Image: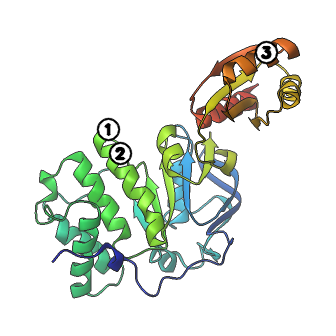
């Protein structure tokens, strides 16, 4: 008999108070000699699926390691579930799942043995660990392959095993470091669907990636790191139907915004990026007329562009100007 996915959620899950942050940092710094991996980072992460984006070297992995208590910050405060990480790192890790980016699987073990071992490390008795291993591998689509050696698995299958070991102990929060790394389009799609389903099990997620589209499709909130600094923290609105135009102008965008408002449009503004969406009419025609009327000059404009790409590019440009 196949295990029921609902059994993965225990009766004793501790949920944060409504609206209470699950991750908080204040003035967080991490330096490696002259390298400033994190610089004055203030975070307030609420329950849900949160994306952590930034280029390679932006500080994403360093932040995750600090949250796990595996690396000590140079300065600042960090707490998870309201508990300072320095106060009880081992106790917090029992409530957190972690999927590392790098290859770390013992290739001479079966998937069932490895995931059960991960459950036992979290304090789950052996028989229960075996049951949970089977259930969790079923959830990630590896129930039939659970007795195969990990060395025989494809990259996508190994990524799913890493995901399974991160949730087998029923954590309240999962930290995923580039979970779709190295996957082909089919494997990436399967991974993103699995992450999105964590909401059903009451598991909050901090999802690190440098692929903006993955974050937009999966997350409720986004955090952007650039050269160790937090440059953006905001909710991700669900995609809207209808015409959408995103553009950035040279100089002051306010004349264009005022002209759009006078035409009955309520544009959203992120830094220097203006987005008009959900229109019944042709958005390009409306924006064209507003540009001509306001005298604004376009830096770039397009439809269906990644909103996060717009925000990241404008935010990094502002920092370097």
Q: How is the image coloured?
A: rainbow
Residue 302 percent coordinates (x, y): 61, 22
Q: Are marks 1 and 2 in contact (CB under 8 Å)?
A: yes
Give the label, 3 or 2, closer to the camera: 3
Q: CA distance from mark 3 to mark 2?
A: 39 Å
* Residue that label 3 marks: 289
Q: Is residue 109 left or right of residue 102?
A: left
> Could you say which disc has been placed on residue 185 in the image?
1
Residue 97 percent coordinates (x, y): 42, 68
The residue positioned 57% from the left and 29% from the top of the image is: 305
- On the rendered image, what quadrant is the C terminus found in? top right
Q: Is residue 71 left or right of residue 29?
A: left
Q: Is residue 234 left or right of residue 174?
A: right
Residue 256 percent coordinates (x, y): 84, 23
| SS for callout 1 | helix
Q: Is residue 239 above or below residue 252?
A: below
**Nearest the eye: 182 or 90:** 182
* Residue that label 2 marks: 189
The residue positioned 56% from the left and 41% from the top of the image is: 54
């Amino acid at each position: 008999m196949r295990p029921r996915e609902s059994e993965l959620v225990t009766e004793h899950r501790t949920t944060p108070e409504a609206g209470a942050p699950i991750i908080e940092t204040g003035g967080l710094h991490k330096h490696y000699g002259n390298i400033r991996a994190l610089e004055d980072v203030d975070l307030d992460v609420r329950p849900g699926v949160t994306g952590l984006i930034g280029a390679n070297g932006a500080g994403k992995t360093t932040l995750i390691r600090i949250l796990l208590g595996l690396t000590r910050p140079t300065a600042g405060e960090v707490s998870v579930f309201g508990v300072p990480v320095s106060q009880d790192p081992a106790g917090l890790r029992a409530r957190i799942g972690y999927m590392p980016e790098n290859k770390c699987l013992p290739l001479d073990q079966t998937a069932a043995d490895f995931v059960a071992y991960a459950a036992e490390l979290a304090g789950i008795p052996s028989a229960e660990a075996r049951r949970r291993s089977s259930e969790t591998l079923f959830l990630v689509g590896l129930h039939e392959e659970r007795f195969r050696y990990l060395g025989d698995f494809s990259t996508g299958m190994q990524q799913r095993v890493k995901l399974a070991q991160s949730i087998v102990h029923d954590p309240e929060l999962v930290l995923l470091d580039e979970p779709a790394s190295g996957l082909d389009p089919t494997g990436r799609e399967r991974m993103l669907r699995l992450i999105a389903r964590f909401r059903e099990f009451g598991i909050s997620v901090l999802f690190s990636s440098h692929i903006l589209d993955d974050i937009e499709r999966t997350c409720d909130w986004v955090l952007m790191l650039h050269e160790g600094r937090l440059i953006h923290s905001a909710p991700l609105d669900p995609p809207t139907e209808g015409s959408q135009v995103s553009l950035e102008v040279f100089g002051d965008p306010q004349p264009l915004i005022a002209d759009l408002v006078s035409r009955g449009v309520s544009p959203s503004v992120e830094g220097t990026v203006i987005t008009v969406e959900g229109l019944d009419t042709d958005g390009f025609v409306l924006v064209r007329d507003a540009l001509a009327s306001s005298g604004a000059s376009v830096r770039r404009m397009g439809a269906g562009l990644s909103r996060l790409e717009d925000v990241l590019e404008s935010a990094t440009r502002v920092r370097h100007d």
